[in-house]
Structure formats: C-alpha cells, structure tokens
Image: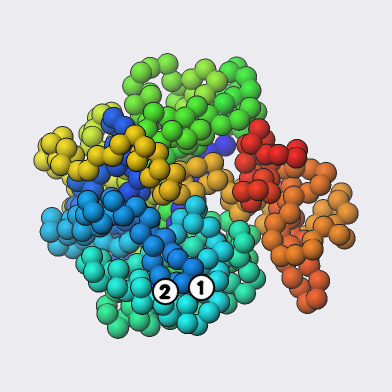
Amino acid sequence: MGGRVLLAVTLACLSAGFVSAATDKVVCYHGSWSTYRSGNGQFTVSDIDPTLCTHLIYSFVGINTDGTIAILDETLEITKGNLAKFTALKEQNSNLKTLVAIGGWNEGSTKYSTVAASASLRATFIQSALELVQTYNFDGFDLDWEYPAQRGGSTSDVANYATLIKEFREVFDEHGLLLTAAVAAASSSVDLSYDVPSLSNISNANDAAIRGWIERGADPQKLALGLGFYGRSFTLSSSSNTALGAPTSGAGTSGPYTLEAGFLGYNEICEAQLEGGWTTVWDDEQKNPYTYKGDQWIGYDNVESITLKVEYAKSLNLSGVMIWSIETEDARGICGTKYPLLNAINSALGSTSVSNNESDSDEDAADEEEGTADDDTAAEDETSSDDDSVADETADDSASNNDSESASEDTDTSSLCTKAGYVRDPSDCNVFYYCMLVGSSYTPLRQQCSSSLYFDETSQTCNWPNLVSGC
C-alpha cells in the first residue's frame, strides 16, 4: 500500500560538476512552510544540521506569467531573512552546496508550459533565476515543474523542456552554478514528459524508477535515488485484516504536525509508536516496514529500509541519494538519537559527516521566526507540495503498473478524447486515459489508479473516493 510512493520525489542533477565516480551525494530538500508547524513538528532553518547533507534545497519559490521569479512568502523569505539564513549554513560546512527550488505541486504546470514555449520568456526566466541565486548566495537552482505535457501543459512541453534545460545550462555553466530538476516517477509519465536521451546528454537526470531512466538512455552516474522521510497511512476496512494489500476505507488519520490525512512524517510515526499498541511488520519483498494499530495502517521507511536503499544506489553506481524532506526527520531525537535516518544514510555511504547529537540546543530554534495562527494557515496552503498531500499518489504514480497501455476493449473510446490531457473512464472511476495527439487524431492511453482510489478530473490526480465527484 505504501512502498511505491516513497520514491515519488526525485532529483535530476544537471550540472557537469555534480557528476562523480562515487555514490556520495546526500541531497536534502527543506520545506520552508514547516516553520509554521506546532510543537515538535516546527522545523526552522536553525534546526538543519548542515553536516549531514552535501546539498540543501530550499523549497519553494514560484513563477510569474512574465517569466520572473515570484517569492511566495515575502515575510518569511525576505523580511525575516530565511533565504539568507539558509545559505549562511555554508559557514558551518564549507563543502555544503545550497540551492533554491521553484515550483512544486501547487504551482501546477500551465505557467511553466507557457514560459517554456517562448524564447523571450525563457530568457527572462533564466535571468531572473540567476539574479535570485546570486543575490542570496545560492550555489544553484532547482526546477520542480510538475509536470511537462501534463496538468494543463502541452505536448510541445517535451521538446520545450529540453530546450529550457539546455539554455539554463549554458547560462549557469558560465557562472559555475548547479542546475537541478525534480522529475516524475512512473515510466508512463516519463514517456509523456521527458526526452530522456536529450536530457541525459546535457544533464544528470534522476528518477525513482531508476532502471526506467537507464533503459531510456540516462547515464547511471548522472542519477540519484529519491528517499522519503514520510509514510502513507490508510484506514483499514477491518481491523482484523492488517496484511499488505488489505482493503481500506480511505486515508489514515492526520498527524499532529503535517495535518494531512493519509500522510505522516517519520517524526509523527515514531512518536505515535512511542505511545504503544502498534505492531510493526517487515515486508521482505519490498524491504520496507509497515505498522498498524486498530484500523490505522502505515507504510514507511525506517533506518533498516533506508540503509538498504542506499546500498541499492551504491550497487547501481548512482551519484547518491535525495531526501524529501528533512523537516519530517526526528530532528530533536524524541524517539532516540537526533536525525536517525540521515545518520543512517551517511553511515551507509561511508561518510564521516555525522551529526554531533549533543551540539544542537533547543535555544537555536527560539531565534527563528514565529507566525500568527492566520499566517500559519496561509503559508502552509501556499507552499505545500505534492509530497505533503494525497496528490503524491498522482495519476502518473498510481498508474505505474499500467504504463502506456492502449485503451481497454471494455470501453468505447472512439469519442473519449477531444483534446490532449487526462479523461476518466465513463464506466469505471478507477480507470483513466491520457489523450495524446497522434497525427490528426487523439489516441487514448489507458492507465489505472491504485485499487482504493478514483481518478479525480478536477485535480487531475488519483484521489480518495469520497473526495471525487461524479462517481
């Protein structure tokens, strides 16, 4: 139920300087909105241990229709100086690289599609990104367009994305800057959104479906493996059936910090387990644990499974691993030592950069900014990404077992596709199609959500049935 989703957020490192002969990169995303969370869940820039990551990525800024960068939380990023505080972490680790990410799930695809299609808007975008990076002393820029040729995008996005990356690369190489990009996980989405051979020639690309990218022409030394510091939770239909694949009635209960049904940070999971009553099972096929209590079921990663995934990355001679995201780590050591997952990753990689668990103090966090209740809500809604919502189990992810199949014979698809994009099967809410323009007509490619989800035409994702209208 939860194993596949844990590799949904991925990193593509597009600068030649990122490539190395060893598996030694630890690339960590930081979701800035976690500063507005309550209690032990609040996580600020001062809570980051800069010795545990080789690269830190600040998430997110946005894009304007004219191609310029939009600061999504000016009070936090500018007035309270979060961007400057983030890059100042390099003073504690001279080898650390810091980047700023643009996009995320809530930003959508339409604006990026429009900008990528115009040479002048691309130039404006690249120049604006360069100015942001240089102004705040970042070492690079992360492009998190979710996703080309999807969610309101155009089929021309595939070529335009490669052009955008090439032009970004040319400018950023002149200044010795890194360029990274988050890319889709499922092979069906990879085929729709990316020209992998072209990108591999000009970039270091990564996807959770590592072998899929390699098969499409990407160099393993230009790939990093995505790891998730969170779990997916479900409400069981019956508390007496707790096995992997058991029927569910919907999302699991939300946690006290992330406040998202069906999603729990690692810190929320381990704190819940401290209360007792949970049964944890190791699934030897997926090499992952799951845990259950009553009607609540959670699939997640722990120290053991994270270590195995790092060993997997090493076995494929990848450049390293990427983490989404460090604010849901057990940073305070509530469940034991501080940063157990990050320390396990560094240990498996053979890194000597491990956290001094006694060096951090609670007073460090007190110096960070605090927001009002109203500010908290606004910032959380404004900046949360697909990895912080049910939308993580998106059409491209949930359909990974049905990649690019032709339309089912059970449904008459002759009049189903009238334009490019996704459309739900009129007779089966679990099934949907991607309508692709081939010649002068549209061809439907059949895809399918996970068994407990329906395709939501409003959000263009696989969603919980009670949230989907028309089914």
Residue beneath the point at 28% across and 51% down: 75
Comparing 73 with 57, the one in front is 73
Q: Quadrant of residue 79?
A: bottom left
> What residue is pinned by disc 2?
125
Q: Position of residue 394 (x, y in %)?
A: 59, 49
For badge 1, the amino acid type reads Val
Q: Quadrant of residue 236?
A: top right
Quick one: label 1, few (<14), some, or many (20+) residues within 10 Å? many
State if disc 1 and disc 2 touch (CB < 8 Å): yes
Q: Is residue 379 above or below residue 271?
A: below
Q: Is residue 127 above or below residue 44?
A: below
Q: Left or right? Give the position of 321 relative to 242.
A: left
Q: Earlier in the sequence, mark 2 or mark 1?
A: 1
For badge 2, the amino acid type reads Phe
Q: Which mark is residue 115?
A: 1
Can residue 421 be seen from the camera position used here?
yes
- Which quadrant of the figure contains the C terminus? top right
Q: Left or right? Give the position of 257 relative to 106.
A: left
Q: Position of residue 281 (x, y in %)?
A: 47, 28
Quick one: label 2, few (<14), some, or many (20+) residues within 10 Å? many
Query: Circle 2 — which element?
Result: helix
Residue beneath the point at 14% across and 62% down: 94
Label 2, label 1: how many angstroms apart (C-alpha)?
8 Å
Comparing 342 with 393, the one in front is 393
Q: Position of residue 44 (x, y in %)?
A: 25, 44
